[in-house]
Image (tube, coloured by chain):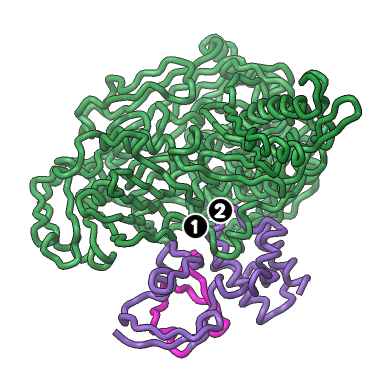
């Protein structure tokens, strides 16, 4: 067991974890933040995407100890109270989801993109978001949602 | 009521999904997100052999591991076999394993890590037996018999099968043989100007839902069994759980959950019975999640198939007759499918065409591979790939434009389908033409560019029971209770819009509640593009009843006879100049103990002569040297009635399209010696955002549809036929005909070089 200290959604968190504890399990089971989802387990589908110091990572491949000293952002952390983040609002307005299981990962990956590049082209959106799979939407409305949020910001 | 008299506030409007805020904030609760006090985790040990006798299982070391709360083998679980129609699935293997990945033992432990460590301490002695993997090998007289026992067949199949159906005929390893025919094919072939025969092969693919199969079972102190499961038909699942365990249905509660995608794959019980057994043995709630490896190697994916089509055409290139032989590979168990054979294997075969004579034989066959289930218009994507390729090949061999051949033979107003069902309100040729215009079918192409077309017809599902309960509260607000989860289809939002339309209000006035199985009426769930139709009927029935009750109340309030009450365009109740709205009426009623009011509504399945029709056009660019295929653009044209929610409607078109793109271009569960070796998403290639073609959707509105709002179905319309449009386009580009899916660069390069050396 090892003690880790991280900033999670702007809140200081100190916990003891096993070295082998995956970040996705630490978030979902230890911290009860179930907004981050687990699916492929091999870092391909992106459902487990969280931001570490603003950069998207697959939390199914990261160890919790990896987050020591870092700022971690999950889907629970991007709205401001009742005010949705512009990306969340855009996904809502443009139908960027259906079953919703990939949606937290999509939104966080998109947030990292727009934070780095506020007005990406559609081609840049597609290339950035390639690591976030969706089986319901066919992707078109995800792109539309991200483009709309970029336009609105 | 028809499309013309909509209020403009609900049906037809791009209403934001009512489950949207929960989903974009991560607050939506899927079964895997539920945690209960004392909850432990179940994991299963799976057979490494495709066929083996289980001689002995020693679980003593596993039981001794600290943190292990229960260990079960086939000897510890009920003998009852599960199956949605054919009851052949044991909860854990009993004496014999029939596929690589079959569950042989199970552990419940405090953590997943302990459970998996315990699995490694279970010793199983196997005696490998001969196995058979290909469907055409399995039906040979000397093939190993996979199910020597007599399988009980439940006869209440929800979809009627017309024709000669024999369950478990005297052919080795055959689950069902269906023969359907219409007209006189022998006579037609005798008169034919030309006859064409082609054979096609389609692999198994996974539904690709991002949420894996998950279940959580908790047995209360009072014996009530609580279940949270990623299962789209909880009332059906409850019945099966009751039958398997002996727990009465009204002592089982399937609780509401959000489901992360179904696509046909989440109708079966999967691990639920086993999870109950572990919960009972451990005395703790047990959660089981199939990890991605288990989903890909031991889920219930689409049936692979070989399809042989033989057609007769006359001098005018009109189809005279089709003979079809379809063999579906069902894997080791038949129980994951709720019908005798896949409906799409025959029901929509060439349904978009006027074919006066047809004979179809469909076999569903056991093999020692993972059991297959339902996926998106089951049977149709396999068979339609074959039909739309075959029609294209006929056109090419005759020397006719493939689009023209389809126009000439497309089903038209008043025609019968090949199976003799009447179809009316058709605009097939108009839809083909509109799509072709938008696509620019006649425009010249650069070298390496190819154009392809495919068409498809599929009626809205109108089977199975949908029940809703509509309540008008003391404040006049509306609540609609539905019986199954929204798997992503958006039907909860559709339900809200339909209710709002009936009461001339907006969805803000309507609450949708998913009941549990103790409190809600039977809901069959998402299947065969049925929900808008069936929920629509149930809501209409409940709304009509409710309006009569409200009218009676209003009559009392306004001191007149119910027959004097008029319901206005704004939903208010008037008589002789006096008017009262729903809110005021219910307030008055509440003060007299007459509110809230609840009415139930059920759908009324009835035969219909309406269908949905689509035409797809694909443009590909093919590199002759590398064989790489790029799908540049697609035009998809649909003949539609009233669209309840245009954003949801378009979302279905787009999502279905990309599933078809996956089927065509990259997805295949590869089996080696009966085991799936494409066992993670790095190897099993789902389409990504980089794979989408430019898309134009052409909608032809104004078609007829189901009462009361003339709605049509869209759920299966863009995922079935698109694969053939793509492979037809590949042929157009480089003259290589792909009769197997998925497209591969190797096959194209091989085809190109064969053509070059033949020239």
> Which numbered disc covers residue B29?
1
Query: What color does chain B have in the rendering?
Result: green
Does the stretch in magenta take in A52?
yes
Does the stretch in magenta take in B71?
no
Q: Residue furthest right?
A: B577
What is the quadrant of residue B454 in the picture? top right
Query: In the rendered image, which residue does mark 2 sit on?
Result: A99
Chain painted purple: A
Instruction: Give the crowd class for mark 1: few <14, some 14-19, many >=20 residues within 10 Å.
Output: some
On the image, the x and y values in percent for residue B472 come to 66, 38
Q: Residue at x 34, y 83 (%)?
A: A16
Q: How many marks?
A: 2
**Which chain hosts label 1?**
B
Which portion, as a residue range, is magenta?
A: A43-69
Foreground pick, B623 / B24: B24
Instruction: For marks 1 and 2, give the one nearer the viewer.
Output: 1
On the image, the x and y values in percent for residue A29 come to 39, 69
Using the numbered discs, state the Cα–Cα distance from disc 1 to disc 2 in whole angstroms: 11 Å
Secondary structure under tag 2 reads loop
Question: If the image is split into quadrants, where does the N terminus of chain B sit?
Answer: top right
Residue A52 located left or right of residue B416? left
Instruction: Give the crowd class for mark 2: few <14, some 14-19, many >=20 residues within 10 Å.
Output: many
Foreground pick, B590 / B276: B590
**Which chain hosts label 2?**
A
Residue B69 located left or right of residue A151? left
């Amino acid at each position: 067991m090892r003690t880790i200290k991280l900033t999670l959604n702007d809140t200081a968190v100190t916990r003891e974890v096993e070295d082998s504890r995956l970040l996705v399990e630490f978030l979902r089971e230890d911290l009860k933040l179930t907004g981050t989802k687990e699916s492929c387990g091999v870092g391909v589908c992106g459902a487990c995407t969280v931001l570490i110091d603003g950069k998207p990572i697959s939390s199914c491949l990261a160890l919790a100890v990896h987050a020591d000293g870092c700022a971690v952002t999950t889907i629970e952390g991007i709205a401001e109270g009742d005010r949705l983040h512009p990306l969340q609002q855009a996904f809502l307005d443009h139908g960027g989801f259906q079953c919703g299981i990939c949606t937290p990962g999509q939104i966080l990956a998109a947030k990292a993109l727009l934070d780095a590049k506020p007005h990406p082209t559609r081609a840049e959106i597609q290339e950035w978001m390639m690591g976030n799979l969706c089986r319901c939407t066919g992707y078109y409305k995800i792109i539309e949602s991200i483009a709309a949020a970029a336009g609105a910001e | 009521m028809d499309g013309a008299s909509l209020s403009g506030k609900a049906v037809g409007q791009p209403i934001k999904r009512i489950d949207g805020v929960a989903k974009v904030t991560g607050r939506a609760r899927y079964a895997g997100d539920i945690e209960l006090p004392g909850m432990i985790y179940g994991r299963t040990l799976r057979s490494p052999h495709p066929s083996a006798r289980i001689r002995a299982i020693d679980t003593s070391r596993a039981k001794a591991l600290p943190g292990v709360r229960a260990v079960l083998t086939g000897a510890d679980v009920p003998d009852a076999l599960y199956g949605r129609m054919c009851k052949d699935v044991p909860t854990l293997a009993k004496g014999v394993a029939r596929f690589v990945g079959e569950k042989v033992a199970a552990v419940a432990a405090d953590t997943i890590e302990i459970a998996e460590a315990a699995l490694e301490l279970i010793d199983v002695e196997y005696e490998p037996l001969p196995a058979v993997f290909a469907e055409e090998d399995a039906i040979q007289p000397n093939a190993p018999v996979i199910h020597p026992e007599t399988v009980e067949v439940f006869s209440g199949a929800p979809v009627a099968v017309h024709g000669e159906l024999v369950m478990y005929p005297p052919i080795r390893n055959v689950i069902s043989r269906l023969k359907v025919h219409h007209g006189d094919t022998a006579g037609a072939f005798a008169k034919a100007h030309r006859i064409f025969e082609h054979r096609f092969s389609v692999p198994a693919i996974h539904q690709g839902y991002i949420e894996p199969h998950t279940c959580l079972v908790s047995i209360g102190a009072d014996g009530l069994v609580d279940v949270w499961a990623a299962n789209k038909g909880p009332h059906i699942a409850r019945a099966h759980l009751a039958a398997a365990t002996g727990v009465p249905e009204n002592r089982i509660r399937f609780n509401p959950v959000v489901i992360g995608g179904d696509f046909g794959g989440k109708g079966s019980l999967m691990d639920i019975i086993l999870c109950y057994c572990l919960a009972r043995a451990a005395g703790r709630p047990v959660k089981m999640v199939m990890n991605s490896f288990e989903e890909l190697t031991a889920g219930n994916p689409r049936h692979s198939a070989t399809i042989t089509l033989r057609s007769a055409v006359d001098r005018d290139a009109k189809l005279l007759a089709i003979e079809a032989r379809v063999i579906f590979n069902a894997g080791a168990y038949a129980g994951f499918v709720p019908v005798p054979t896949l409906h799409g294997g025959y029901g929509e075969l060439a349904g978009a065409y006027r074919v006066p004579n047809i004979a179809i034989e469909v076999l569903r066959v056991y093999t020692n591979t993972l059991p297959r289930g339902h996926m998106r218009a089951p049977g149709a994507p396999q068979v339609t790939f074959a039909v739309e390729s075959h029609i294209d090949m006929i056109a090419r061999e005759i020397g006719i434009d493939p689009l023209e051949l389809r126009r000439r033979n497309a089903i038209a107003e008043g025609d019968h389908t090949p199976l003799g069902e009447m179809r009316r309100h058709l605009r097939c040729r108009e839809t083909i033409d509109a799509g072709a215009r938008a696509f620019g079918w006649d425009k010249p192409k650069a070298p390496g560019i190819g154009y392809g077309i495919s068409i498809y017809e599929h009626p809205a599902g109108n089977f199975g029971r949908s029940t809703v309960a509509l309540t008008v509260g003391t404040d006049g607000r509306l609540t609609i209770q539905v019986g199954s989860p929204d798997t992503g289809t958006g039907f909860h939002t559709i339900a809200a819009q339909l209710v709002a339309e009936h009461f001339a209000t907006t969805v803000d006035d309507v609450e949708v509640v998913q009941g549990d199985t103790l409190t809600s009426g039977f809901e069959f769930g998402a299947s065969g593009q049925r929900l808008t139709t069936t929920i629509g009927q149930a809501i209409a029935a409940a709304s009509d009843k409710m309006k009569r009750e409200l009218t009676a109340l209003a009559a009392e309030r306004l001191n007149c006879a119910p027959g004097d009450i008029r319901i206005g365009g704004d939903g208010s109740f008037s008589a002789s100049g006096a008017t009262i709205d729903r809110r005021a009426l219910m307030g008055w009623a509440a003060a007299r103990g007459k509110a809230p009011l609840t009415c139930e509504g059920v759908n009324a399945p009835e035969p219909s002569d309406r269908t949905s029709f689509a035409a797809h056009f694909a443009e590909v660019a093919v590199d002759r040297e590398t064989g790489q295929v790029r799908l540049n653009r697609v035009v998809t044209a649909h003949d539609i009635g009233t669209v309840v929610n245009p954003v949801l409607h378009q979302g279905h078109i787009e999502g279905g399209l990309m599933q078809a793109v996956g089927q065509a271009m990259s997805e295949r569960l590869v089996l080696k010696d009966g085991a799936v070796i494409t066992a993670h998403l790095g190897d099993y290639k789902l389409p990504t955002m980089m794979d989408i073609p430019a898309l134009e959707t052409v909608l032809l509105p104004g078609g007829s549809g189901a009462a009361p709002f003339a709605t049509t179905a869209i759920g299966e319309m863009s995922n079935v036929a698109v694969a053939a449009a793509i492979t037809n386009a590949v042929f157009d580009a480089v003259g290589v005909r792909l009769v197997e899916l998925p497209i591969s660069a190797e096959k194209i390069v091989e085809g190109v070089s064969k053509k070059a050396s033949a020239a």
